[in-house]
Amino acid sequence: MGINGTHFNYYQVCKRKLWLFANGINFEHTSDLVYEGRLIHEDCYPQRSAKYEEVELDGIKVDYYDAKNKVIHEIKKSNKVEVAHEWQLKYYIYVFERNGIEGVKGVLEYPVLRKKQEVFLADWDRQRIEEMMTEIAGIISDDKCPPVEKKALCRNCSYYEFCYSKEVDE
């Protein structure tokens, strides 16, 4: 299984969520929060489908790519885990570069908050991405699921019931 942007995002947020997702235990399809995010993506920029492309490349899928200006647009509902969004977008830029598309930058967009943030990839980021890829591969290939780490974000996670169920062995 290849590493994708969701893996990079979950790596920043929760190693357990990363492992569960990567090992086929997925609750996103039943999450109201995920559904709400999908609606924001579809409804906030309806004109973009005609202007920009959704691009799939080496296992990643970017929301919108402006090929003329070399800008990846990533739409998020909330900035609560902004660092995870930044690393996910940096990973997308890294994958584009790895495929010979140079000079790409990213824009994180939070339409509900009416906020945008430019994201660039520095040399240090490229090195850190390669280290993270190794760490992510190690986590997802491990036979054991990482233990629950109680975080403020847990209550809004689609895996909350799974992780905090009395039946789950930790």
Image (cartoon, rainbow, N blue to C red):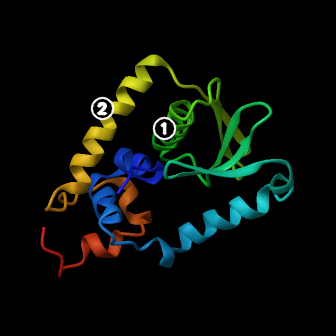
> Please, which residue is most extreme toward the front here?
100
The image quarter in which residue 106 lies: top right
Amino acid on which disc 2 is placed:
Glu
In this orientation, which residue lies closer to the viewer: 122 or 84? 122
Residue 169 lies, in percent from the top left, at: 12, 73
Label at residue 131: 2
At horizontal 40% and vertical 56% (from top left) the residue drawn is 153
In this orientation, which residue lies closer to the viewer: 138 or 161? 138
Using the image, determine if residue 4 lies above or below residue 82. below
In the picture, measured across the screen, residue 52 lies left or right of residue 96, that is right
The residue tagged 1 is: 91
In the picture, measured across the screen, residue 92 lies left or right of residue 164, that is right
In this orientation, which residue lies closer to the viewer: 107 or 51? 51
In this orientation, which residue lies closer to the viewer: 138 or 101? 101
At horizontal 23% and vertical 51% (from top left) the residue drawn is 139
At horizontal 75% and vertical 37% (from top left) the residue drawn is 67
Element under disc 2: helix
The image quarter in which residue 99 lies: top right
Whether residue 145 appears in this view of the structure is yes
Using the image, determine if residue 132 lies above or below residue 52. above
Residue 22 lies, in percent from the top left, at: 33, 61
Residue 149 lies, in percent from the top left, at: 23, 55
Amino acid on which disc 1 is placed:
Tyr
Q: Earlier in the sequence, mark 2 or mark 1?
A: 1
Give the quarter of the figure containing the C terminus: bottom left
